[in-house]
Image (spheres, rainbow, N blue to C red):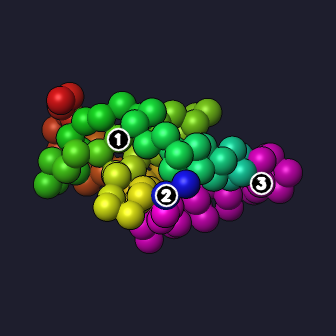
Amino acid sequence: MSDLGFSSAALEDLRQTHGFLRQQVGEDFAAKQIHEILTATELLGRFPRLGTEGFYGPERRRVRRFPVGAYFVYYVETNDGLLVLRVVHSKRDQRQALGQTDQPSNG
């Protein structure tokens, strides 16, 4: 398995997700959801091309997106492995969460 890293924004996303879910539905569900997301990132570390590729963010960076339940994991392949950029709930404004003002383009 290649190296797997998390941006500070992705770590904050996970922290906020856990806190919100713990408050709304309890610790067990919150922990289970975070575990599912982390398990998916480990899978992506082994098979990084599973996600759909697009160009996201203000720099129009080549980024992959992978669904995990009600969340999208945004990540990039690096020379050493994989870097998770964001973990965003599917009902959130994805463009705003990624810091862009227009739709992602494919290819």
Q: Specify few, some or many for label 3: CA neighbours under 10 Å numbering under 14, 14-19, or 20 or more.
A: some
Which comes sooner in the sequence, label 3 or label 1?
3
Q: Which residues are magenta?
A: 3-32
> Horizontal and vertical percent for residue 50?
45, 33
> Horizontal and vertical percent for residue 22?
76, 56
Compared with 29, 51 (above or below) is above
Quarter of the image with the C terminus is: top left
Which comes sooner in the sequence, label 2 or label 1?
2
Which comes sooner in the sequence, label 2 or label 3?
2
> Horizontal and vertical percent for residue 98?
31, 51
What residue did someone put label 3 on? 31
Q: Is residue 58 magenta?
A: no
Q: Is residue 31 magenta?
A: yes
Q: Are marks 3 and 1 in contact (CB under 8 Å)?
A: no
Three-letter residue code for mark 3? Ala
Q: Nearer the viewer, residue 38 or 100?
A: 38
What residue did someone put label 1 on? 64
Q: Which residue does the image show at 49% across and 63% down from the upper left?
A: 3
Three-letter residue code for mark 1? Arg
Give the main secondary structure of the magenta stretch: helix
Find the residue positioned furthest to the bottom: 8
Task: Give the Cα separation between the discs numbered 3 and 1.
Answer: 25 Å
Three-letter residue code for mark 2? Ser
